Amino acid sequence: MTDTIAFKPYPGCAYIDTAMDALFDIMERFEKQLGRPIDPAEVADVKVEASLLTIAMNGMSAGYMDPSKLSPTNINFSLPVSIALGIIAGKLTGAELTDPFLDENRREIVALAGRVELAHSASLSVRFIKAIDEVTDLEAMLAELDAVSLFKARHKLREHLKRVATMGPREMVGAWQSLNQPEKMLLKSLVSLRGFFGKGPGYDLGQSRLEDLRMPFGARVHVTLRDGTMLEAEKHIPRGGPGDPDRLQVAAEKFVREASPVLGEERAKKAVEVVGSYEKHSLAEIREALSPAGA
């Protein structure tokens, strides 16, 4: 299971990560080219195309969002507010979710978040499904869902989907039509009639190759400035997620950033070295490395 852990560089659900990665890529390129950061006031709108996972996450949180009092808990699952925070602060860390920062910048955050539009990308959803199928047997797993059980669970499913509020029949047809032929063939290959005649024999996750797992929570971000300039970036594997070759480095950087106020930067970096080679150290040495000086 360690191979499937996602080290999240941003405070929030993992499904916001690729969108934030793409946004910061845009902002970094803009600053390098023009010698200044993007001014939030010059952002006309932001469009984010993402997989169904991200869209559903945002849909579930939207009903709990109170523009008059921003809550760190709700922001964790709101992509528009996270995008707005990233543009305004130039970063997204725990510091941007403190009450003083949110209260001081609330009007600007809410206004900018209102100019962020989310759209489902069926191709990005299929990319995620394909990545899971590459290390598991999705057809066998789905065959465990027989028609009778699905019928009995229809009321719970209906209530859940109502809260998620992602796609109706028309949107589903549009999503299917937007796929290319290989993407459609992949989805068709996962559908088995076995489930209509009883459950399949069961699937053992021990047969999965989780060490090869990639987590493509893909996102395309389009930023349009008021002067008509259009800036775009696309990311598939989130920084720190399975499939990112620098995954552990992302975790180390986050630890140093967040632990430095308590441990001091040098001591935090030393703690990363000790934990990274924990086999060579005693429990007492590891505890000492993770404790403030003199504690």
Image (cartoon, grey):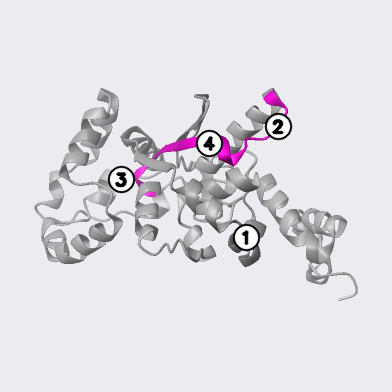
Quick one: 43 or 97, which is closer to the camera? 43
Residue 256 — which label? none
Q: Quadrant of residue 144?
A: bottom left
Q: Which residue is mark 2?
A: 36
Q: Which residues are magenta?
A: 34-53
* Label 4: which secondary element: strand
Mark positioned earlier in the residue sequence (2 or 4): 2
Quick one: 16 or 98, which is closer to the camera? 98
Percent across and percent down for residue 159 are 22, 64
Check contact, mark 2 vs mark 3: CB within 8 A: no
Residue 43 — which label? 4
- In the rendered structure, the answer to whether residue 253 lies left or right of residue 216 reads right
Callout 1 amino acid: Glu
- Decide if residue 259 is in sight here: yes
Q: Nearer the viewer, mark 2 or mark 3?
A: 2
The Cα atoms of the two marked residues, 1 and 3, are separated by 48 Å
Q: Is residue 52 magenta?
A: yes
Q: Which residue is mark 3?
A: 138
- Decide if residue 5 is in sight here: no
Q: Which residue is mark 1?
A: 104
The Cα atoms of the two marked residues, 1 and 4, are separated by 20 Å
Percent across and percent down for residue 146 are 15, 56
Mark positioned earlier in the residue sequence (3 or 4): 4
Q: Which residue shows up at 46% across the image and 37% down it? A: 46
